[in-house]
Image (cartoon, helix red, strand yellow):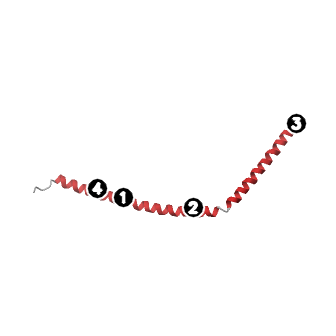
Amino acid sequence: LEPMPVAAIVTIVLVVVAIVVIAGYLILIGNVLANVSSSLEKVIDSVAKISDQAKPIEPIISSINRDLGSGQGALEDLLARKLGGGRGRR
């Protein structure tokens, strides 16, 4: 058997080193993604709690919006009557 050429040994070593480095980065990325996932779960839980706490306010806001809408309509009617009445008197 002939000994392996130095270039082949260097190539094999470099391939092994590259595989180890890539595997290390993939493990690092996996850990980062796991931390991000955990943080997102906490944020989603917090948002869900805030949403649940805000639900009792929704009917009140709808009622206020209805009242404001009818009040706006009444003010627009009053303004239209005043402008219409003022023009007729001139």
Residue in view at x 68 percent, y 61 percent: 57
The residue tagged 4 is 18
The residue tagged 1 is 26
The residue tagged 2 is 47
**Other residues around mark 3 within 10 Å, as few (<14) / some (14–19) / many (≥20):** few
Point out residue 38 in the picture as x, y percentages from the top left corner: 47, 63
Which of the two discs, 1 and 2, labels the residue nearer the N terminus? 1
Point out residue 50 in the picture as x, y percentages from the top left corner: 60, 62
Point out residue 7 in the picture as x, y percentages from the top left corner: 18, 52
- In the rendered image, the quadrant that contains the N terminus is bottom left
The residue tagged 3 is 88
Point out residue 78 in the picture as x, y percentages from the top left corner: 83, 45
Look at label 4 and name its amino acid: Ala
Look at label 2 and name its amino acid: Val
SS of the residue under disc 2: helix
Which of the two discs, 3 and 4, labels the residue nearer the N terminus? 4
SS of the residue under disc 4: helix
Which of the two discs, 1 and 3, labels the residue nearer the N terminus? 1
Which of the two discs, 2 and 3, labels the residue nearer the N terminus? 2
SS of the residue under disc 3: helix
Residue in view at x 87 percent, y 40 percent: 85
Establish if 78 lies above or below 39: above
- In the rendered image, the quadrant that contains the C terminus is top right
**CA distance separating discs 1 and 2:** 31 Å
Look at label 1 and name its amino acid: Leu
Instruction: Kindly indicate whether the residue at mark 4 contacts the one at mark 3 (C-beta within 8 angstroms).
Output: no
Residue in view at x 65 percent, y 61 percent: 55
**Other residues around mark 4 within 10 Å, as few (<14) / some (14–19) / many (≥20):** few
Which residue sits furthest left?
1
Instruction: Kindly indicate whether the residue at mark 2 contacts the one at mark 1 (C-beta within 8 angstroms).
Output: no
Which of the two discs, 4 and 1, labels the residue nearer the N terminus? 4
